[in-house]
Image: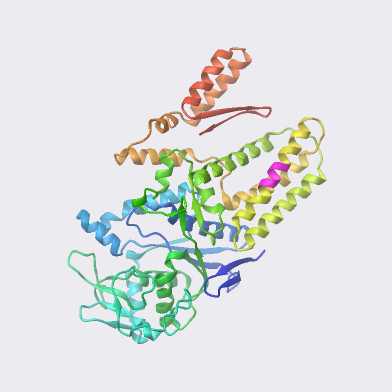
Amino acid sequence: MTLRLFNTLTGQLDELSPADGGELRMYACGPTVYDYGHIGNFRTFLQVDVLRRFLKLTGVPVRHVMNITDVDDKIIRNAAERGISIGEYTPKFVDAFFEDLDSLRAERPEFIARATEHIEKMVQLIQRLEAAGAAYKTEDGSWYFRLKSFPEYGKLSKKDLTGIEDGARVDVDEYEKDSARDFALWKAVKPGETSWDTAIGRGRPGWHIECSAMSMEFLGESFDLHAGGEDLMFPHHENEIAQSEMATKKPFARHWMHVRFLLVDGKKMAKSDGNYYTLRDLLLKGYKASAVRMALISVPYRHQLNFTFDGLIEATNAIDRLRTFHERLTKAALPAGESEAMQQAASKARAGYFASLANDLNTADARAPIFDLVRAANTALDKTAQGQGEFLAGDREAVLAALKDFDAVFDVLEDRDAGPTERAVAWAQADGREVAAELLARQGLSDAEIDGLVAERTQAKKQRNFARADQIRNELAEKGILIEDSKDGVRWKRK
């Protein structure tokens, strides 16, 4: 099944497949590690995760490269304020990023490129641009890209930039969205800044040259897909195209994928508005990492997501329904045979799921047939329990196969939520942050200890010691552990 994905460059849905028939070579802009990542950042990384998982599910091998920007204006400024080098400043934020990425079940890229480890490649690219007449050196030793040398500038963002003022320069890495000026490729050394001695002088790279150099190092001068948040389209991605294509005289990336902004309660996320959240903030509020993942990917990447706590609760409930059904399905004692209705329902759900994802990664539409199947299967299981035989043993594998395909992309069926919350609590305590007493109480019992108490409660009920059974239930409830009794057995879950 071929994926049709919106291409920002062409403005239409284009088939996405490897140009050489082998691996699909893709580059996705990673974090700038000046602080902890917020949920808007992770929405982009998770939507890229959906893309790579669906490609692999449909048999397309992936060569995915992600950069780590560990030198830029913000990092240098923050490190200077703390009186330390960027080499001392960035590691904790790099480690935190990957811990959060793992907590959200995002697969690691095949290659991770740190900017500070590829300075020589950036210098070589600047030298190629100088040879092409597209780079020039200023009196202070900085190097700039000559925008007038690339007449196609603006073709990605569709901005009319015909009035470019030749020679006007912008020195900062991030600047006004409609500014079109010669941008810095290499910044001359300044007092107190981290710098490198190179063939083009002492200094450090501009932000834009980093991604061009590293993507081409791992993927070649032309590759299949470049992805990132919509905020990077201009000027960052526009600048990448200009400097890359001027150096190589080849198309840089055939396909461009941009993930829309995230709002929080209908407003742009901002610390000043009190609606700025990292993953750790949400975990410390008692929400689960799986629910955050589900909430961030359930709205398709080209639609703006309005993140709300009601939405997190909805995601939590949806995951609980899936996990409860999966456990019921795997444990149910079923009569032999197959039900034609259930076989058709499972086949229809899988077909609808794949078709929705193949249509521009429509995760919202992809969820619907799977949850429809869960409802239909639960109804059929109820009737089978009543002796009507509408769900039979041969239907189990068909439905489990549909759930397996769903989870290959969404990855929420297995309950791995305790680990991320435990790590968040440990991090907060080590960092001197306040942790709610209720959350600490929830973390006070291990899974094995809960299993033991649940088993003791079951035994107490068999012995008709209902007072002890109720006492255990109440004690667990006080610590955020809910017990569910059903005809298929006892199940517990953390709030």
Q: What x and y, as percent, mark residue 487? A: 68, 27
- Image height of 148 relative to 95, above or below: below
**Quadrant assignment for the N terminus:** bottom right
Visual colour scheme: rainbow
Magenta stretch: give its range. Answer: 371-376
Q: Residue at x 42, y 33 (%)?
A: 439
Dominant SS in magenta: helix
On the question of residue 162 being in view, the answer is: yes
Dividing the picture into quadrants, the one containing residue 34 is bottom left
Residue closer to the observer: 331 or 410 = 410
Q: What x and y, as percent, mark residue 453? A: 52, 22
- Name the side, left or right, on which 76 lies relative to 7: left
- Image height of 323 relative to 231, above or below: above
Q: What x and y, as percent, mark residue 81? A: 21, 56
Q: Determine if the magenta segment contains residue 436.
A: no
Q: Determine if the magenta segment contains residue 374.
A: yes
Dividing the picture into quadrants, the one containing residue 384 is top right
- Name the side, left or right, on which 80 lies relative to 342: left
- Name the side, left or right, on which 202 lies relative to 479: left
Residue closer to the observer: 58 or 37 = 37
On the question of residue 334 being in view, the answer is: no
Residue closer to the observer: 168 or 440 = 168
